[in-house]
Each structure stands twice: as structure tokens, then as C-alpha cells.
Amino acid sequence: MLHKVNRLSSTPKLVLSSIHSAVINNANVNVESESSFQSINPATGLSVGSVSNCGEKETLSAIASAKDCFKMFKGSLHSSRAKLLIDWADLITKNNRKVAELVTLEMGKPFSESLGEVNYATSFLYHFAAHIRSGLVGEMLTPGMAHWRPVNVKQPVGPVVTITPWNFPVAMVTRKAGAAIAAGCSVINAPSEDTPLVSLCLAKLAVEAGFPPGLFNVLPSTIENKQRIGKILCEDPRISALSFTGSTPVGKLLSKQCADTVKRVHLELGGNAPLIVFETADIDRAVAGTMMAKFKNAGQACNAANRILVQKSIYTEFVGKLAEKFVKLKMGNGMEKGVSIGPLVNSKAYKKVSSIVNGSLAVDVTNVDVISGNKDTSIGDDPFYTPVILSCQENNHLPIFHEEIFGPVAAIYSFDTEAEAVEMANNTRYGLQAYIFTKDMAQSWRVSENLECGMVAVNEGAISNANNPFGGWKESGIGREAGHLGIDEFTEDKLICFGL
Ligand SMILES: NC(=O)c1ccc[n+]([C@@H]2O[C@H](COP(=O)([O-])OP(=O)(O)OC[C@H]3O[C@@H](n4cnc5c(N)ncnc54)[C@H](O)[C@@H]3O)[C@@H](O)[C@H]2O)c1
Ligand SMILES: N[C@@H](CC=O)C(=O)O
């Protein structure tokens, strides 16, 4: 594993120079004040491009455009919505290497993972295209009077705002926009300040795919402007729904801002996933699943394994086998071949992970030990966080047990009984995903039922896909994305009762 990284060892092939404008009503809109900001490549510290820094004026203009578009688009044929989504997905696929390169340049994940994300992202567009072709018609209901004929119809909710994070900057946009557009809604996307160019690239391809003006607008901005933009979008009565993916504290704030207009709020928030390895498990399978669930995207996933709970009888064997795989990880610039761990997205993220690890060591250094890697996090070169496996004997008082790590830190705890494992797993305000490894069928069912979370992966390190719903319980969110449920976030039900 590389500890020191040569930041400039690989010069990006794609360095963009001109200012990249917001996309509103299918047009590139330069910000009046000519304010702009840089998107920074975390692997090199170099600028990937200059981006317009949107403010109130652009936000109001995007709202007006989305509202106008909605008036026309809400009555569009389902087949024409499906065609738009398919054409958009085809164009993204045709440009997959360019889009993937942009992902790696803006947020650092290895290029092969970025390519995988682009494929994952288009799967949502194809999924919702198929979904809308085959359904969303409503249903006949039971009449309350003999001469009544009641029906429940599904209608698009209205213009939708999507606020998206940097960790899956393509897939989090298409998972929302695919469902919203399939439902008949227009969309305003406010991307993360770390990955604005990815969203702008998606908007460019949407225009090429024939999207009508106002259907998909993108408002890039710095975080300072985002706080103002976000408030305007949440409070404007012309916006009917907010779909947010990001941290729990920001989700709570946006939810409060939406309260006055009683907006539909859909929240995909943080996680603190337990990954439980029982003595009944196939250990090799559990090790492979743990590597995937923990180190994919350098641990920067909402559903990353945050607490690895291992039954005492197999602890030594599991940890030994995990350490063997772990030492093969290669950290470096995500554009270099063979790299499996890129930098964290920025210095702030690096400092946050360091503070969780160092804070836990400070609380109880005798009960947190290094199994593989190094305790000294300064060995990495900010924002390259050196991966580490920690053995944590006590749990309840450690920040690492309760906080979302969002970095390549595998914290391993031990337990004696199944009941103890379930209690430890549920000892968190989060409830997004859990992973369990066992060959005992009854145990897998029993434990799955007892876990307080929206998704359980049994003997698998990754289960997210377009066909199945994604979402959390407790402070991990409200609502579902993808699958057969994702479109419900963007529709309203209406009863129409005919008297004969
Ligand atoms: N549940 C899921 O599906 C899912 C998926 C991906 C990421 N996440 C979560 O996202 C977090 C990581 O992403 P992040 O660091 O970008 O989170 P974040 O909450 O800091 O930011 C997410 C988005 O919200 C915006 N934002 C931040 N403050 C805002 C404000 N006051 N008003 C309006 N917008 C604001 C950011 O610009 C960004 O676009 C983690 O907690 C992770 O678990 C959840
Ligand atoms: N990893 C997620 C998104 C959250 O980070 C997914 O599986 O879609």
C-alpha cells in the first residue's frame, strides 16, 4: 500500500479552462456578477475548471423555467417521457469514459469505480423509462354508494428540487431526476460544490437528448451561496417537492425550511451501517463482502460498513484474512492504473476522519488498537487518508462507534451472542443499511427482521441496484428511491368519484 502519494504524478488529460455556466431553460446562463469558483481535483490540488457561482437571480430564473416547463410536461405521453430518459441514458453511455474521468477528477474515486458509477447511474434512467411505459395509471376503488365509480389517479407533484452530494455525483442525480421526469415533473438540480461539472455535463447531454427547455436545470454554487439558494428553493411555493441526499444535519435543516410551504420532502441521509459476521458465516465470503462494503469509494458511501461486528469464536481468523486482503489496497491518484483507494474528497473530509479516529484514540487508547495500517494518520498526505483496520474493544463511548466515519477506516468490534450483536447494531440514531454474514437461513431471517434499518444485505457486500428500493429508517431518511417505490416521491394521489 502506498503511504506517500506523488500528487502530480499523473497530469489529468481533461483540464477544462473556460467558465462553466449554469444551465437554465436549456441555455448556458452566465452569472450576472461574473462570480465564479474553482472545482478542485483532490488528487493534485489543481483546478478542474471554473464554474459560475449562482445566486438568487439564477435561482428565481430556474424556478420560473421549471414551473413553465411543468405546465406543458405534466400532460406529456408516458412513452415520450420514456424516450427522453432512454436517449439521455444512451448519450451518457456513449460518453461514459469522459463522464467517468470528470467524476475522478472532481472527487477522486478510482477511474474504474467512476466507470461503474456511470453505468449504475444510467441503470436508473432505463429502469424508470421501463416503469413509466408499463404503469403509473392509478386504480379503480370500491364505491361507497351503488351509483358511484371512484378512481384514484396518480399525478405529477410539480416542479422538483434535487440537492445532491459529491460521493456519487452521477448516480444520485439520475436516481432522482429519472424518477421525477418519469412522473411528469420538471427538475432543478443543485449539485455539490465539489462536483458541479459532473451535473453540468449531465445537463449538456440532456439538452442534446432533446429535453424541452426547463425540464432539467442545474444551479452550481459555492457552499456559501448554496445555503442561500437552498433556502429560496425550499421556501418558494412554486416548488412542490424537495429530494435531498446528503448528511443528516443538513437534511434536518432543509426539512424545517420546507415546512412553511408544506412541501413534499424526500430525504436520503447519513448512515452508520453495522456489518455483522456470525460464526456460522462463510469467512472468505464475509471478508470479500467487508472489503467491498468498507473500502469502495474509500469508505465515502452512506451505506459503507461503519461498524464491523465479529463473533468472538471467529474473530482471529476473520481479522487475519481481512488483513491479508487489506495490504493489497493501493492508494493513489484515481486516474492511475491499479489504484483502489483515491484521496478523500477534500481537506475538510480528511480532517473529519482524522478527528474521529484520533478522538477515539484519545478517549480510550488502551481499547483501540491497530490491526493493520498505521495509527499515525499524519503519514498520509492530506487529503489522502491512509487506510487502517482498528480493533475496538469497548464501543459505547467511542466517537468512531456513533459517528459516520466516511473514510477508509475499518473499526472492528467483537460480540458473544446474536442478541448482543443485534443490540449493538441498533445502538445508533441512524438506520440506513446493515450487512450480515451467516449460512444459517433462520438466523439470517431472524436478524434481518430485528435490525432497525431500511436495507439488509445478507452474505453480500453491495446490493444497491435500480430494480429495488433504496432508503433508510430513523435519522437516515424518509422515503425511497429506485425500484417500484421511487416514483411515488414525485406523484400525488387524486380521488375522482363519478356519480352515474
Ligand atoms: N442515504 C443516501 O442515499 C445517501 C447517498 C449519498 C450520500 N449520503 C450522505 O451524504 C453525506 C455526504 O455528502 P456531503 O458531505 O456532500 O453532505 P452535505 O450534507 O454536506 O451536502 C450534501 C448537499 O447538500 C448541500 N448543502 C449543504 N448545506 C446546505 C444548506 N445549508 N442548504 C442547502 N444545501 C446545502 C451541499 O452543497 C451538497 O450539495 C453523508 O452523510 C452520506 O451518508 C446519503
Ligand atoms: N452508495 C450508495 C449511495 C450512498 O452513498 C448507493 O449504493 O447508491
Image: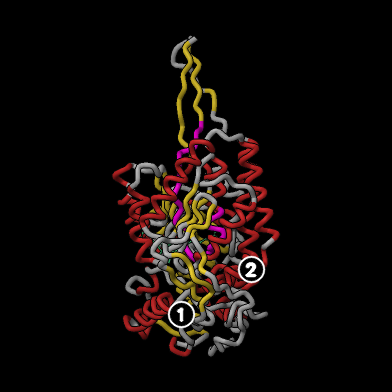
Instruction: Tell which of 90 and 488 is nearer to you.
Output: 90
Asked which quadrant contains residue 327, the reply is bottom right
Any mark on residue 285, and which?
2
Residue located 64% across and 64% down the image: 116
Instruction: Tell which of 121 and 274 is nearer to you.
Output: 121
Asked which quadrant contains residue 171, the reply is bottom right
Report the residue marked by disc 1: 391
Q: Position of residue 284 (x, y in %)?
A: 64, 72
Mark 2, secondary structure of its residue: helix
Q: Position of residue 220 (x, y in %)?
A: 46, 61
Q: Are marks 2 and 1 in contact (CB under 8 Å)?
A: no
**Left or right: 261 in relation to 384:** left
Q: Amino acid at mark 2?
A: Arg
Residue neighbourhood size for the residue with mark 1, other residues' Cα within 10 Å, grouped as few (<14), some (14–19), many (≥20): some
Q: Is residue 162 magenta?
A: yes
Residue 460 visible in the snapshot: yes
Mark 2 CB within 8 Å of ligand 2: no
Any mark on residue 184, and which?
none
Residue located 51% across and 56% down the image: 23
What residue span does the magenta drawing correspond to?
154-174
Badge 2 or badge 1: first in the primary sequence: 2
